[in-house]
Image (cartoon, rainbow, N blue to C red):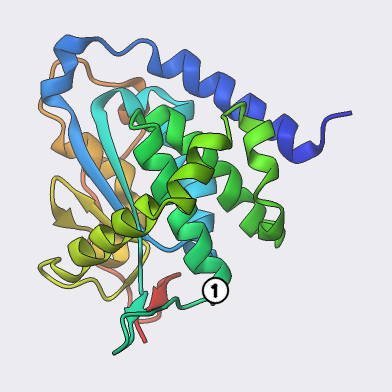
């Protein structure tokens, strides 16, 4: 019998396929660029991916988005060039695994399957079971394992580190979301409204019709962002 996590993943992936197949090549030039800088074991990153970012794939909003995932986050580099991941060695490992998935399957719908599955396990405090995500998603473990073992994943991940370090303004926490290269800062949870406002094409997604026209950049003094701050 399939586990609840596998069943949920299959439902998500079925929805993903249905909505994403409606995008045509003529719409690609109008797509809004969305970049997520994150780390795999930050609970707020996991929550954002599983409960919010996934809306790109289970509604038609993803049809107007070019999504980039950059798994590095608040990782630091020691004087000996070793990585110090904010949530320990498991996070370093899973950041590289996800970097390999992004490289192996450039198609955003495909690599998001594995990222979503791993981050869902993190939300459930079961990230140690991440290997089960290959069976759950139907993706092959072999190319990711090869990427990890032959050092390609390390080089990709270091590139993500260099990219994260060059952000202007610098990121202050994760999840750090950019829409058309503009950081949303603490308002990242309103990313859908920013996407809809930034879209200049003719095919307005139904998902945009139920969102406010203006995103809210003003937070009250009592607002506490759900983020992992840089140490």
Point out residue 199 in the picture as x, y percentages from the top left corner.
Answer: 16, 31
Q: Considering depth in this image, is 210 or 96 the residue closer to the camera? A: 96
Q: Exactly how many numbered labels are in the figure?
A: 1
Point out residue 78 in the picture as x, y percentages from the top left corner.
Answer: 33, 86
Residue 205 visible in the current orientation: yes
Q: Residue furthest front?
A: 150
- State which quarter of the image contains the N terminus: top right
Point out residue 121 in the picture as x, y percentages from the top left corner.
Answer: 66, 52
Q: Residue at x 41, y 46 (%)?
A: 100
Residue 42 visible in the current orientation: no
Q: Considering depth in this image, is 102 or 183 the residue closer to the camera? A: 102
- Image: 45 above or below 23: below
Disc 1 target residue: 89
Point out residue 105 in the picture as x, y percentages from the top left corner.
Answer: 39, 31
Q: Considering depth in this image, is 114 or 100 the residue closer to the camera? A: 100
Position of 114 with respect to 38 (left or right) is right
- State which quarter of the image contains the C terminus: bottom left
Position of 163 with respect to 141 (left or right) is left
Q: Would you identify the image quadrant in which residue 29 lies?
A: top left
């Amino acid at each position: 019998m399939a586990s609840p996590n596998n069943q949920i993943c299959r439902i998500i992936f079925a929805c993903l396929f249905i909505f994403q197949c409606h995008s045509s090549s003529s719409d690609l030039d109008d797509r809004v660029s969305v970049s997520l800088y994150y780390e795999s074991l930050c609970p707020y990153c996991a929550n954002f991916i599983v409960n919010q970012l996934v809306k790109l794939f289970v509604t038609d909003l993803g049809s107007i988005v070019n999504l980039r995932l950059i798994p590095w986050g608040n990782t630091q580099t020691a004087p000996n060039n070793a990585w110090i991941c904010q949530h320990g060695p498991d996070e370093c490992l899973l950041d590289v695994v996800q970097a390999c998935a992004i490289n192996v399957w450039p198609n955003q719908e495909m690599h998001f399957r594995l990222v979503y599955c791993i981050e869902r396990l993190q939300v459930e405090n079961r990230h140690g079971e991440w290997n089960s995500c290959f069976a759950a998603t139907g993706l092959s473990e072999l190319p990711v394992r090869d990427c990890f073992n032959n050092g390609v994943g390390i080089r990709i991940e270091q590139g993500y580190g260099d990219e994260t370090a060059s952000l202007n303004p610098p990121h202050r926490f994760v999840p750090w979301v950019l829409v058309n290269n503009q950081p949303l800062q603490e308002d990242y949870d309103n990313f859908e409204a920013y996407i809809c406002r930034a879209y200049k094409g003719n095919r307005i997604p139904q998902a945009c019709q139920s969102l406010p026209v203006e995103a809210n950049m003003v937070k009250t003094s009592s607002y506490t962002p759900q983020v992992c701050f840089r140490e």
